[in-house]
Image: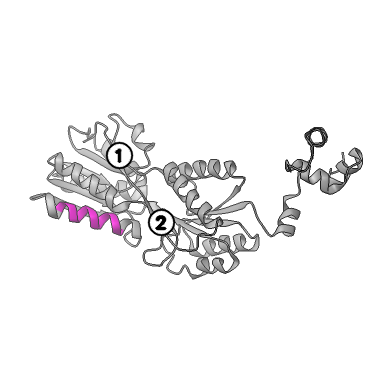
């Protein structure tokens, strides 16, 4: 069957094209009977509106770009799943692009969003992104940009992220309450603002309340690196009574090392993580963690995007509160 368009529907029903268009949009000026006939025929003929033509005519896109370092990450998978639900309920669809943590690919993805006149863009920047001026220039085209999770450190822009300082403070307080004195604290990439915020709050909390505790801090950028660091640290200096993991990626490497060394939490060593919440359930006992929910962050981020669509012109930094989820590893 050839493509069905508004003209074909109008000819078959002996109606004007404008009447058919209004009927499909439930316009109040069109009678219920006419709407019924139009919709029944459009269903039978499998009519689908030409979204590209509508975009060209109205200059309004219903697609939102999402740029992330990688999709193979539980936090981002949870974020995207929830964001897609929010978008669909509000009549939008998502275009997902991965940067591979490469700033050049990130800019190529941004260019694609610009060329296709996306309604808006969500972006979690790479660990090497130092200049966000090209993102901010999208505002000249009335394309709002919401930075989420991995956000610029200093620039005034719309940011939606987990309250990283609060998450680290809650984790530190739990270790102090558990009377842990020799802690191996593993943080992520030292150049990322998320790492800097968590490290600062973690250390400040121990400085204020954790009298006598010894903190061995190190940075790991991957699961494999976390495995190597923990294996080496606990083999040469096995005094640690707890390990703090800044992320799920680090937690996986830490637990692989713990299992390789034959250690059993919490008897041999305590484990505490900041986590999206899925990975801790893989282990027995379940890992105690501070929740940083990708799904909740997506809902908060989309609400901010809708505000931008509605005309909000000022920038905001919104933070998602964190909560402690008790397991049996501490």
The residue sitting at the top extreme is 284
Q: Nearer the viewer, residue 47 or 311?
A: 311
Element on which disc 2 rests: loop
Q: Is residue 58 left or right of residue 64?
A: right
Q: Main secondary structure of the magenta part?
A: helix
The verdict on residue 197 being magenta is yes
Magenta range = 196-206
Indicate which disc residue 90 carries. Answer: none
Between disc 2 and disc 1, whose residue precedes?
2
Where does the image place residue 249, in percent across and percent down from the top left?
37, 46
Q: CA distance from mark 2 to mark 1?
A: 24 Å
Q: Which residue is mark 1?
A: 255
The image quarter containing residue 293 is: top left
Q: Nearer the viewer, residue 216 or 293?
A: 293
Q: Which residue is mark 2?
A: 150
Asked whether residue 70 appears in the rendered view, the answer is no
Disc 2 crowd rating (10 Å Cα; few below 14, some 14-19, many 20+) is: many
Cβ atoms under marks 2 and 1 closer than 8 Å: no
Q: Nearer the viewer, residue 170 or 74?
A: 170
Q: Is residue 64 left or right of residue 285?
A: right
State which quarter of the image contains the C terminus: top left
Where does the image place residue 193, in percent across and percent down from the top left?
34, 60
Where does the image place residue 37, in percent across and percent down from the top left?
82, 33
Q: Is residue 93 left or right of residue 208?
A: right
């Amino acid at each position: 069957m050839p493509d069905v368009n508004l003209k074909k529907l109008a000819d078959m029903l002996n109606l004007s094209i404008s009447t058919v268009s209004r009927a499909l949009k439930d316009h109040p000026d069109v009678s219920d009977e006419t709407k019924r006939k139009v919709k029944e025929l459009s269903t039978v003929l499998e009519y689908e509106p030409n979204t590209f033509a509508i975009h060209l005519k109205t200059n309004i896109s219903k697609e939102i770009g999402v740029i992330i370092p990688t999709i193979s990450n539980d936090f981002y998978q949870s974020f995207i799943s929830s964001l897609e639900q929010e978008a669909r309920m509000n009549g939008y669809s998502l275009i997902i692009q991965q940067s591979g943590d490469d700033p050049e690919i990130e800019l190529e993805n941004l260019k694609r969003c610009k060329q296709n006149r996306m309604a808006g863009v969500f972006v979690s920047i790479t660990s090497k992104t130092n200049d966000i001026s090209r993102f901010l220039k999208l505002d000249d085209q009335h394309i709002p940009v919401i930075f989420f999770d991995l956000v610029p450190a200093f620039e005034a822009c719309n940011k939606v992220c987990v309250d990283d300082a609060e998450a680290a403070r809650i984790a530190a307080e739990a270790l102090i309450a558990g009377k842990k004195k020799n802690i191996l604290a593993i943080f992520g990439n030292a150049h990322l603002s998320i790492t800097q915020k968590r490290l600062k709050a973690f250390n400040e909390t121990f400085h204020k309340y954790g009298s006598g505790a010894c903190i061995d801090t190190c940075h790991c950028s991957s699961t494999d690196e976390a495995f190597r660091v923990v294996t080496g640290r606990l083999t040469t200096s096995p005094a640690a009574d707890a390990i703090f993991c800044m992320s799920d990626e680090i937690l996986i490497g830490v637990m692989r090392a713990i299992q390789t060394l034959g250690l059993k939490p919490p008897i041999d060593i305590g484990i505490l993580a900041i986590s999206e919440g899925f990975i801790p359930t893989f282990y027995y006992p379940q890992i105690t963690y501070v929740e940083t929910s990708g799904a909740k962050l997506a809902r908060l981020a989309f609400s901010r995007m809708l505000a931008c669509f509605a005309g909000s012109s000022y920038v905001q930094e919104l933070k998602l509160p964190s909560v402690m989820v008790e397991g049996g590893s501490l």
